[in-house]
Image (cartoon, helix red, strand yellow):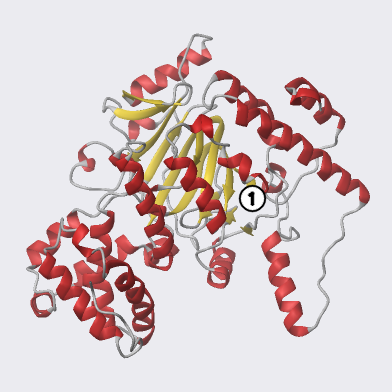
Amino acid sequence: MSNDSVAELEFEHSKSPEVVHGSEKNDFLGNHNSVKTVTDVVCQDISSRKNNTPVNTKIPSENEQEDKRIRMKQSASVLNQLSRAPRGKDKFIGIIKNHHEVLMKDSGVPLIECQNGNEFKTKYNSHGVNAVYLLYNNDSDFGLETPQLTFENLFDYFDMKKKRTFYNSKTGSDVAMSLHKFLKEIEKRDNGNKYRILNNVSTEVSRTEVSRKEDRIDIRLPDFMESSSVVRQIRRKAENFTEAEANSACWKNEKTELKERVKELANVEKYIIFSMEDSFMDVHVDMGGTAVVYHVISGKKVIWYAMPTDENLKLFEEWELCKDKREMTWPVKEIENGFRRVEVNPGVTFVMPSACLHLVYTPVDSLVYGGNFLLAENFDESIRIAKLEKKCLENKSLETNNTFPNFWNTWFLYLEICVLEDLKNGTEEEKRTALRVGKKLYDEFKTCYREFQEWYSTKETVDMLNELRSLLEQEYPNIENIH
């Protein structure tokens, strides 16, 4: 394709038939039980090796292979153009708008598709927290509940005059405005007037004493995140402590002090996202390396995601720490075959693991529920991203409001009232989990605990770590002393 021109790409695209794949838009209709994801094939392959049985995989026909070759060539052409265009500018947005359907749609990155909540639970119990899931029907077995928001009924749920931070996709800058003015911006566009492409991703609606006076929206979290979220576990433990338990605990905290710390925990699990058509978020990892639950209430989102492999994260870290991005290749281009495209339509839920790289494009005006979750199982990934964020804060390429609030304090509080308690008084399963997580916490904090003295004094942190060490010694006899 000469010069990778958009015109040539459109011509070639018009000649090739559209072939739909497992996570593409037409698969949101009809029977998905017959769709085999890459993950299903891999798992079948592993199982077959154990049982010495043949793998039942379909060999693509020559026509299918040729169709795939054409699509991959189209994708490479689009990606080349995007990597040269200034991100967020009209040219970049135009390329995404016109050609997002062919961009990186044929990779072998795994995706686990689920018809309903019961199937999700079965597959989640099998594949765990480090897989990517697409749930087509959000039912009671999944547990997520959100209001049926529309752009017409926002005033029933939100303070329309409150100033909120919107990201201007064209300029890459933030602008403060109310939801009332945001809707006016949509009117400008619909009337053919000059407008901004606005995206709000910071409206968190947990029912705190403050937000209760402003936004009037209730969200019920999915069951699997309600049980596994570090923040939710801390809140439950704190609520269940009796006065006697609090007074007898090893850390000797007053109950009121514990309550104050719990109040300072981050509210990041219940976001409502307001996005205008053509909004675009460049490649990123969510704050603190959190896992993400993403549910489209109305509209549509196109997401490209890449698994948090060491190689992918190294490329992303280099990009984030580079002050002059013009000197580097866009990491999406570098990881081209490691990204997978997925469309998330109304009523569909997308679940990404901790530290998963992703880009998001909005083809139509959309309202979305998004939740960020710290998970003990992904402690290593969360710590890695938090350390990257710390470096970005130091070189001023990141603002504090884009990091996980009280990240390090949250893990110390989790150690204090969850891990230590479970090691001493938990069930056998709780103790096994606490041993595994406690060892990771100890190894991470034994040398750097002095850096995080906001909620705890040096004596308190040393006492906690020494107690943790004594509880871990039976399982890990060669555990090192704190430094």
Q: Position of residue 195 (x, y in %)?
A: 47, 14
Residue type, numbered disc 1: Gly
Disc 1 element: helix
Looking at the figure, which quarter contains the C terminus? bottom left
What is the total number of numbered labels drawn onto the structure image? 1
- Left or right of 403, for residue 83: right
Query: Residue at the spot x=59%, y=25% of the render?
Result: 85
Q: Position of residue 31 (x, y in %)?
A: 73, 55
Tell me: residue 249, above or below residue 10: below
- How many neighbours does mark 1 have within 10 angstroms: few (below 14), some (14-19), or many (20 or more)? some
- Left or right of 247, for residue 113: right
Nearest the eye: 244 or 254: 254
Query: Residue at the spot x=81%, y=72% of the render?
Result: 55
Query: Residue at the spot x=35%, y=53% of the render?
Result: 387
Whether residue 137 appears in this view of the structure is: yes
Q: Position of residue 234 (x, y in %)?
A: 26, 65
Tell me: residue 297, above or below residue 83: below
Whether residue 204 appears in this view of the structure is: no
Q: Position of residue 270 (x, y in %)?
A: 36, 48
Query: Residue at the spot x=52%, y=63% of the render?
Result: 130
Q: Which residue is mark 1?
A: 338
